[in-house]
């Protein structure tokens, strides 16, 4: 016996198997990212007044990424439509765009991560704090491009501060008590930022691998079983749209609030 | 033998490659239909290790999970030895432990750290590597497609991936015993900050193992739900499904929606452990007298909420499949329909839904306010109603039945009072005021073990004895089955009943010395110490546990011996059951049914007046039945 | 359906998404009220944005009831997770906070 409803829909549910399967999987993904969003809300609500960062992330880059991903969602849908109408060349074109856009998204993300990785908060012996991007360092000294503040809280809310100075500052190593970059361990904001965007990026990567496979070796099925192939494009497209959906919430929550 | 694959309008699409299937002219055994193997015989690896057939996968899950159950049981025996004889080297196995585990088991004595490791891993292994894979994945995979008339699960390769993720997760968990620092020691609940500050990498292994196991369960859940919705045979309407299928359906939904927050939490705790973040570490945390070098700002309570959001629905995952099995076995062995089928269905749906909003009854001691405690107390009390309804329906189903006392029935009957005790003793725990006293005492241990050990596991044993003839074509030995039952039943009660008393007397759980530090012997004259009678119960429990272990030996021997020497069954339906899995050849071939079955009646048409036999299989019409309903 | 009308629809959806994104950014940088008000407004717009993607690109609007049901339960359980946990962490026993 063949497994039924892999291609045609079952009459009473109106779905073919893979479509039901992917929606069920997406429901579980909603709960996964929901758990992370809940963690974000609870950590932020629990943070003392004035100690939750604002403006640490580049809204420009975030917006660019948002538009990139939205565009890739469009090209994904159009790739499926192309399959539906039988235009294989257009399908290839649209999904090639999807993959390129995905790559761009990940590149922008890597740049943002790198920016945080070389951004240091340096506690000095006299109690002041130096904060900025690393220019160079050696055994004797550390050179950053940033500023020195006396109150730690000045480092948190960047939105309310205008014209933050970016001078080149040289610090001697024996003046430094602690030097830590804006990585996940820096504070709970960077922790949740890296974790959520990292998991999201892994989903982008996974989705790209699947779409890449279907674009490349998997597209052989176009000749043998066009309908099933189209279904695969639809199902992988649904996953891709979900990943876009997550970003639609990630972007405002992390970048804009 | 029909070698063409039948087309059944209007539900089927034309085959994509029809030419392929007309070549099968030589099948000596049942028709393959479409399968992944093509014309050639699959290799050993493809057939038994990397199989996509739900029956093989079910057996894989079954055998591996039984091994894990045995291993988890052994951990418990070691713990009970330490509790009854703290600081004394383990007899016989002591030197072996010392050799394998190094300084943690120096001289064959179980150190407190090792005791904690055993405790954490016993819980983890029994729940996630033992009961869930056996109850949900093993039985579900084997039986559900057969019961609904499907050729396989909707996504056979995802099914295989799910098993291998489970297997890998199990390997990671086992390996963690041998790394420096040992296995996870922060309980199966892995509370932060202990889980992050404890000096072992075992916690990280535990988290990685959990991620793999959760992934396995999620893939399985998607498969089950899609299969039950999409692959029911024509005529198999929702209200004609055997209760076992309903139970598995709800269980799958619980797994699908409750596991991901724990996966999220697991990722966060892994970040805490490996990347030194502070998701669950509060500001000002001091470890070993020194301020911890973390950013702080996290919340230990957050872990608890995320953990128990899964943790509570998880216990319903543990019990529902067993309830389903018990229902099937009871109905079959009373030769009458189940009492209250509709109530059962609505109750199991209610249990599934409510299980998501009761979790904080595990957290009454965390300083919750009255309003929120009242909310969770109310939902917890409410969820007991559908649970009791299910048990009541099963009890009432016995009334007026022509009861056959075979081994599966004995275990199913044993399940009822045991789950009753477990469930009823849970009621004081659901009430916040009483729970303040009983929380983290042995009362809790007794309560949840009663539901899972003589509860679920008896249900699972019933299932093994019941479906064994379908899987192998032979019965398990009836005499040794009864020995297994009666010995297990007696010893289970001797092990767990005293724990209620110990708990009420104030013995706390997770104490590696078995309460010695709080005993009247150690601290004479202090108030409210644990009296000698309570401490002596530890020895009773130890010997009962050993007895329980010995009682499993006949079962293990029976299980394997009967494959080749058991009494052969003379029909495909030796128990004379109505459900569809018994309408297949024995054992069912790849593709299960030669032709797609059509369903004409409900699942429990036993002793129908005027029918030809005392049971009517679902895919047969009896003369008194109306034409089949449409979807 | 054909490719041209699909492209047309998609362009509209993309423009709508771009609009909502700019709205969110505008609210974020404005001085309407405190952060709670701004967060509420931004999230409301994000929900609209999500609705566009889910509704049109995932064609959830034309999907069968079964899918809806599963998703509604999911949303309910997520709301439970977030809401009840928030409540639990904000509700303290009487007389224990300062």
Image (tube, coloured by chain):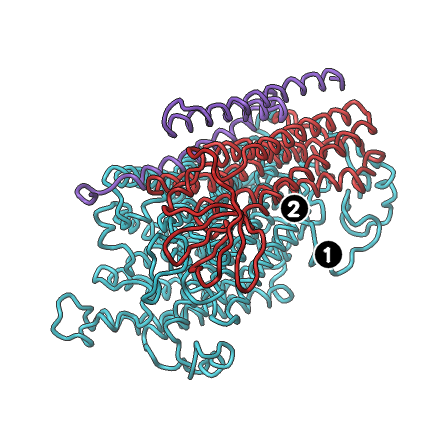
Chain colours: A red, B cyan, C purple
The answer to whether B523 is drawn above or below residue B364 in the figure is: below
Q: For the residue carrying disc 2, how many other residues have a C-alpha within 10 Å: few (<14), some (14-19), or many (20+)?
A: some
Is residue C37 visible in this depiction of the protein? yes
The Cα atoms of the two marked residues, 2 and 1, are separated by 16 Å
In this rendering, do the residues under marks 2 and 1 share a single chain?
Answer: yes
SS of the residue at dot 2? helix
| Residue at position x 75%, y 42% in the image | A213
Coordinates of residue C80 in the picture (x, y in percent): 40, 35
Q: Chain of mark 2?
A: B
Coordinates of residue B456 in the picture (x, y in percent): 44, 53
- Check whether the beta carbons of the residues at disc 2 and disc 1 lie within 8 A of each other: no
SS of the residue at dot 1? helix
- Which image quadrant is residue B90 in? bottom left
Mark 2 or mark 1: whose residue is earlier in sequence? 1
Q: Is residue B168 left or right of residue B299?
A: right
Please name whichever residue, B288 or A111, is drawn nearer the observer in this view of the structure.
A111
Please name whichever residue, B537 or B333, is drawn nearer the observer in this view of the structure.
B537
- In the rendered image, which quarter contains the C terminus of chain A? top left
Please name whichever residue, B229 or B324, is drawn nearer the observer in this view of the structure.
B229
- In the rendered image, which quarter contains the N terminus of chain A? top right
Q: Is residue B314 left or right of residue A138?
A: left
The answer to whether B420 is drawn above or below residue C89 in the figure is: below
Q: Which residue does the numbered mark 1 point to in the structure image?
A: B47
Coordinates of residue B495 in the picture (x, y in percent): 34, 65
Query: Residue B158 got which mark?
Result: 2
């Amino acid at each position: 016996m063949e497994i039924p409803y892999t291609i045609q829909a079952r009459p009473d549910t109106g779905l073919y198997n893979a479509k039901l399967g992917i929606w069920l999987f997406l429901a579980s993904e909603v709960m996964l990212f929901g758990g992370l969003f809940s963690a974000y809300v609870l950590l932020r609500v629990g943070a003392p007044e004035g100690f939750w960062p604002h403006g640490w992330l580049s809204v420009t880059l975030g917006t660019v990424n948002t538009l990139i991903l939205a565009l890739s969602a469009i090209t994904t849908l159009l790739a499926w439509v192309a399959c539906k109408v039988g235009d294989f060349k257009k399908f290839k074109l649209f999904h090639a765009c999807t993959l390129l856009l995905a790559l761009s998204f990940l590149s922008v993300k890597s740049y943002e991560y790198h920016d945080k990785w070389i951004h240091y908060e340096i506690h000095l012996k006299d109690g002041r704090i130096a904060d900025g991007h690393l220019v160079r360092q050696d055994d004797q000294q550390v050179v950053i491009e940033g500023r020195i503040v006396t109150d730690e809280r000045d480092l948190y809310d960047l939105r309310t501060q205008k014209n933050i100075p970016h001078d080149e500052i040289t610090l001697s190593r024996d003046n430094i008590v602690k030097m830590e970059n804006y990585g996940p361990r820096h504070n709970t904001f960077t922790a949740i930022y890296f974790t959520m965007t990292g998991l999201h990026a892994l989903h982008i990567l996974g989705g790209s691998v699947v779409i890449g496979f279907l674009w490349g070796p998997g597209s052989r099925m176009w000749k043998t079983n066009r309908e099933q192939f189209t279904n695969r494009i639809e199902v992988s497209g649904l996953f891709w749209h979900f990943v876009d959906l997550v970003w639609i919430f990630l972007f405002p929550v992390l970048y804009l609030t | 033998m029909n070698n063409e694959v039948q087309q059944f309008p209007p539900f089927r699409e034309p085959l994509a490659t029809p030419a392929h299937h007309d070549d099968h002219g030589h099948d000596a055994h049942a028709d393959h239909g479409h399968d992944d193997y093509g014309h050639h015989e699959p290799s050993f690896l493809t057939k038994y290790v990397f199989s996509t057939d739900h029956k093989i996968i079910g057996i894989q899950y079954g055998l591996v999970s039984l091994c894990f159950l045995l291993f988890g049981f052994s951990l418990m025996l070691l713990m009970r030895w330490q509790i009854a004889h703290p600081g004394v080297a383990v007899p016989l196995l002591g030197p072996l432990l010392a050799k394998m585990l190094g300084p943690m088991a120096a001289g064959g004595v179980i150190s407190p750290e090792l005791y904690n490791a055993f405790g954490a891993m016993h819980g983890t292994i029994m729940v996630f590597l033992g009961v869930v894979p056996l109850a949900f994945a093993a039985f579900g995979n084997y039986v559900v497609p057969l019961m609904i008339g499907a050729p396989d699960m909707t996504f056979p390769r995802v099914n295989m991936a799910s098993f291998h993720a489970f297997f890998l997760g199990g390997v990671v968990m086992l390996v963690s015993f041998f790394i420096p620092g040992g296995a996870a020691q922060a309980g199966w609940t892995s509370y932060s900050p202990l889980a992050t500050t404890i000096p072992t990498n075992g916690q990280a292994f535990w988290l990685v193992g959990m991620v793999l196991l959760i992934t396995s369960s999620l893939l399985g859940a998607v498969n089950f739900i899609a299969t039950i919705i999409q692959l029911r045979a024509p005529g198999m309407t929702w209200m004609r499904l055997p209760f076992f299928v309903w139970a598995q359906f709800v269980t799958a939904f619980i797994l699908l929606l409750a596991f991901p927050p724990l996966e999220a939490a697991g990722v966060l705790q892994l970040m805490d452990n490996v990347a030194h973040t502070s998701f669950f570490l509060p500001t000002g945390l001091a470890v070993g007298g020194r301020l911890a070098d973390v950013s702080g700002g996290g919340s230990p309570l957050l872990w608890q909420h995320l953990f128990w959001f899964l943790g509570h629905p998880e216990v319903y995952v543990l019990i529902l499949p067993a309830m389903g099995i018990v229902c099937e076995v009871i109905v079959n062995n009373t030769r009458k329909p189940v009492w209250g089928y509709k109530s059962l269905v609505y109750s199991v749906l209610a249990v599934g839904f409510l299980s998501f909003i009761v979790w904080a009854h595990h957290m009454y001691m965390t300083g919750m306010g009255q309003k929120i405690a009242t909310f969770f107390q109310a939902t917890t009390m409410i969820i007991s109603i559908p649970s009791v309804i299910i048990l009541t329906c099963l009890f009432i189903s016995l009334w007026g039945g022509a009861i056959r006392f075979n081994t599966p029935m004995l275990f199913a009957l044993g399940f009822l009072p045991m789950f009753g005790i477990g469930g009823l003793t849970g009621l004081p725990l659901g009430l916040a005021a009483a729970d303040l006293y009983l929380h983290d005492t042995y009362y809790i241990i007794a309560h949840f073990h009663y539901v899972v050990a003589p509860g679920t596991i008896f249900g699972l044993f019933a299932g093994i004895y019941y479906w064994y003839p379908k899987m192998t074509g032979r019965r398990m030995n009836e005499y040794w089955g009864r020995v297994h039952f009666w010995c297990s039943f007696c010893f289970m009660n001797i092990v767990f009943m005293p724990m209620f008393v110990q708990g009420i007397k104030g013995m706390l759980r997770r104490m590696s010395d078995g309460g010695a530090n709080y005993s009247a012997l150690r601290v004479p004259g202090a108030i409210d110490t644990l009296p000698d009678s309570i401490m002596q119960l530890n020895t009773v429990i130890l010997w009962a546990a050993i007895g329980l272990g010995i009682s499993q030996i006949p079962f293990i021997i029976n299980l394997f011996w009967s494959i080749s020497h058991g009494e052969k069954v003379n029909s495909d339906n030796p128990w004379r059951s109505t459900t569809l899995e018994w309408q297949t050849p024995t054992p069912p071939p790849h593709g299960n049914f030669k032709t797609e079955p059509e369903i004409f009646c409900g699942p429990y048409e036993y002793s129908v007046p005027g029918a030809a036999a005392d049971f009517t299989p679902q895919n047969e019409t009896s003369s008194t039945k109306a034409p089949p309903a449409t979807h | 359906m054909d490719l041209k009308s699909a492209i047309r629809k998609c362009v509209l959806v993309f423009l709508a998404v771009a609009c909502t994104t700019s709205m969110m950014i505008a609210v974020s940088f404005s001085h309407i009220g405190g952060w709670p008000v701004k967060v509420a407004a931004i999230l409301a717009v994000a929900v609209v944005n999500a609705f566009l993607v889910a509704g049109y690109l995932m064609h959830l609007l034309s999907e069968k009831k079964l899918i809806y049901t599963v998703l509604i339960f999911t949303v309910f359980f997520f709301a439970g997770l977030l809401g009840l946990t928030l409540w639990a962490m904000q509700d303290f026993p009487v007389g224990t906070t300062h």
